[in-house]
Image (cartoon, rainbow, N blue to C red):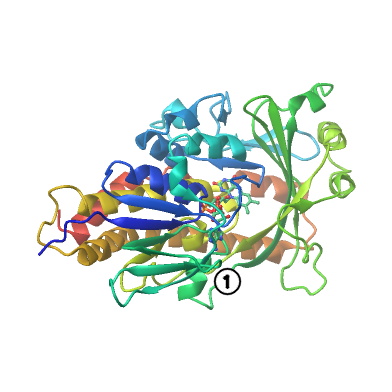
């Protein structure tokens, strides 16, 4: 006999994945969604984030069109998602291109992270966000048969489904896969966001997002919406070396701009002028986790999304859009099984289990391919450390980049349809 009470979902983490999943689920108001967030206030850190056509299209599909507006999202006016420049000559050596079919609205955009977070929050009822709630455990409640989620303050909640969207060091993932751990890739980003007015004296200031490549490091520069500008420097170490530079640095800790000036002292005059005028920098050591063999835990009632499911660090600027696509696929899978007339003879637990299988079938193999591609790229970068590179081979590396359209233009809706066809024979 079907049971008629509403479905209750606990989303752990109010990051991009958690907020977007909650927005997706709003289409069925009889589903009770609560978000549990460890932080005591919602304050997005991490400076900037890029979203590709896949993430932007999904936001639009979910009615989050405000995130695509020019007051929030910065797009290159040339239409190129990325422009690659030479570190000494400042000439454009190569560009990325969107497929012709990608509408201008979905051209890759850069965001100041708080702007994107605010755009998402406009669609989330504040009362469903429970702050200062850090996930501790989840098990079946003997009396109700529901999932009993316990937080570190020992408070609890009973729900039918748990979505772990708690980021790269996910406590939900570690609870079910204790051996899974994000480890340092050896790459460290030095990020800052500040008003462009700091750079108004620089004649050749880039007015588009550019990635400048040198033999041993890169520099990302981009204007952002609302008159901001971002500078992202980088350093690559061998993570296995006991003396690796920055191996003890902490996420979002204060960096030293003089380190940046030293990194880029032999670069073009425009780069040096920008770095000289950069008022501060923060340090972000990049970490990544291994792929998971399953995304479904807790008797088929717990799953993961975003970095919790497939953390690969900031590589290819893909993680934000992947988190959005996960959230869309998760919410669609749940809505499919929990629409008014669907599966009237199935139990709630069976529908939850099938929804999670449909979600994993839509997302797991694609995100695994992204993760393994990033791992292979990271291994190549570490292998190259210490090699002397000629200008010719730098230019070759710049022009012979992998084509990543399969990541940035991935069609999650088509993948969902195909998963439904295979999994549900629909
Ligand atoms: C340096 C760097 C640069 C990046 N640049 C880009 C980029 O340009 N483009 C891009 O697409 N991606 C980028 N990424 C990746 C991107 O930031 C992530 O993939 C994306 O933020 C993942 O979203 P999420 O919601 O899964 O996790 P998060 O945004 O990390 O959100 C997780 C949330 O869970 C909360 N939480 C954690 N633990 C608990 C707990 N125990 N209980 C309750 N709540 C908890 C956290 O406080 C947080 O609010 C970058 C990553 C790095 C490291």
Q: Is label 1 within 8 A of ligand 1 (CB to nearest ligand atom)? A: no
Residue 78, image x, y percentages? 57, 25
Horizontal side of residue 353 vs 407, given as left or right: left
Residue at 65% x, 46% y is: 45
User: For the residue carrying disc 1, how many other residues have a C-alpha within 10 Å: few (<14), some (14-19), or many (20+)?
Assistant: some
In the image, 262 versus 97, the foreground residue is 262
Residue 48, image x, y percentages? 64, 41
Horizontal side of residue 126 vs 400, given as left or right: left
Q: Is residue 67 visible?
A: yes
Residue at 35% x, 36% y is: 61
Residue 269, image x, y percentages? 86, 32
Horizontal side of residue 163 vs 215, given as left or right: left
Residue at 86% x, 49% y is: 256
Horizontal side of residue 161 vs 1, given as left or right: right
The quadrant in which residue 157 appears is: bottom left
The quadrant in which residue 112 appears is: top right
Q: Is residue 3 above or below residue 54?
A: below
Q: Is residue 362 visible?
A: no
Q: Quadrant of the N terminus?
A: bottom left
The quadrant in which residue 294 appears is: bottom left
Residue at 39% x, 42% y is: 23
Q: Is residue 63 above or below residue 181?
A: above
Residue 155, image x, y percentages? 49, 65
In the image, 188 versus 43, the foreground residue is 43
Name the residue carrying label 1.
181
Q: How many marks are shown on the rendered structure? A: 1
In the structure shown, which secondary structural element does the residue marked by tag 1 occupy? loop
Q: Is residue 23 above or below residue 177?
A: above
In the image, 30 versus 391, the foreground residue is 30
């Amino acid at each position: 006999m079907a049971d008629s009470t509403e479905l209750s979902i606990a989303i752990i983490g109010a990051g991009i994945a958690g907020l977007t999943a909650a927005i997706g689920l709003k289409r069925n108001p009889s589903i009770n969604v609560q978000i549990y967030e460890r932080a005591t206030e919602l304050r997005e850190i991490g400076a900037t984030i890029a979203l590709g056509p896949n993430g932007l299209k999904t936001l639009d599909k979910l009615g989050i069109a405000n995130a695509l507006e020019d007051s929030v999202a910065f797009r290159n006016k040339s239409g190129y998602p990325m422009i690659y420049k030479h570190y000494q000559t400042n000439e454009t050596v190569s560009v990325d291109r969107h497929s012709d079919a990608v509408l201008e609205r979905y051209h890759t955009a850069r965001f100041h992270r708080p702007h994107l977070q605010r755009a998402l929050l406009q669609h989330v009822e504040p009362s469903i966000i429970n702050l200062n709630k850090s996930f501790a455990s989840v098990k079946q409640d003997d009396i109700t048969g529901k999932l009993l989620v316990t937080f570190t303050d020992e408070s609890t909640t009973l729900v039918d489904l748990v979505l772990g969207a708690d980021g790269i060091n996910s406590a939900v993932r570690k609870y079910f896969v204790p051996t899974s751990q994000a480890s340092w890739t050896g790459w460290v980003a030095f990020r800052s966001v500040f008003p462009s007015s700091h750079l108004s004296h620089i004649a050749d200031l880039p007015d588009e997002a550019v990635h400048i490549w040198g033999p041993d490091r890169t520099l990302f520069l981009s204007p952002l919406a609302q008159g901001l500008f971002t500078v992202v420097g980088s350093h690559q170490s061998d993570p296995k070396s006991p003396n690796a530079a920055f191996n003890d640095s902490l996420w979002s800790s204060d960096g030293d701009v003089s380190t940046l000036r030293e990194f880029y002292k032999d670069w073009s005059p425009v780069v040096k002028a920008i770095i000289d005028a950069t008022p501060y920098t923060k340090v972000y050591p990049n970490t990544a986790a291994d792929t998971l063999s399953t995304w479904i835990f807790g008797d088929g009632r717990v799953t993961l999304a975003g970095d919790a499911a497939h953390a690969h660090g900031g590589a290819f600027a893909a993680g934000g859009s992947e988190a959005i696509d996960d959230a869309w696929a998760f919410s669609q899978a749940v809505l499919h099984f929990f629409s008014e007339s669907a599966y009237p003879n199935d139990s709630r637990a069976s529908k939850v289990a099938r929804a999670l299988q449909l979600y994993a079938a839509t997302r797991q193999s694609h995100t695994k391919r992204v993760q393994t591609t990033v791992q292979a790229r990271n291994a190549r970068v570490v292998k190259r450390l210490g090699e002397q590179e000629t200008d010719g081979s730098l230019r070759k590396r710049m022009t012979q980049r992998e084509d990543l359209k399969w990541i940035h233009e991935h069609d999650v809706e088509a993948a969902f349809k195909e998963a439904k066809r295979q999994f549900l024979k629909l």
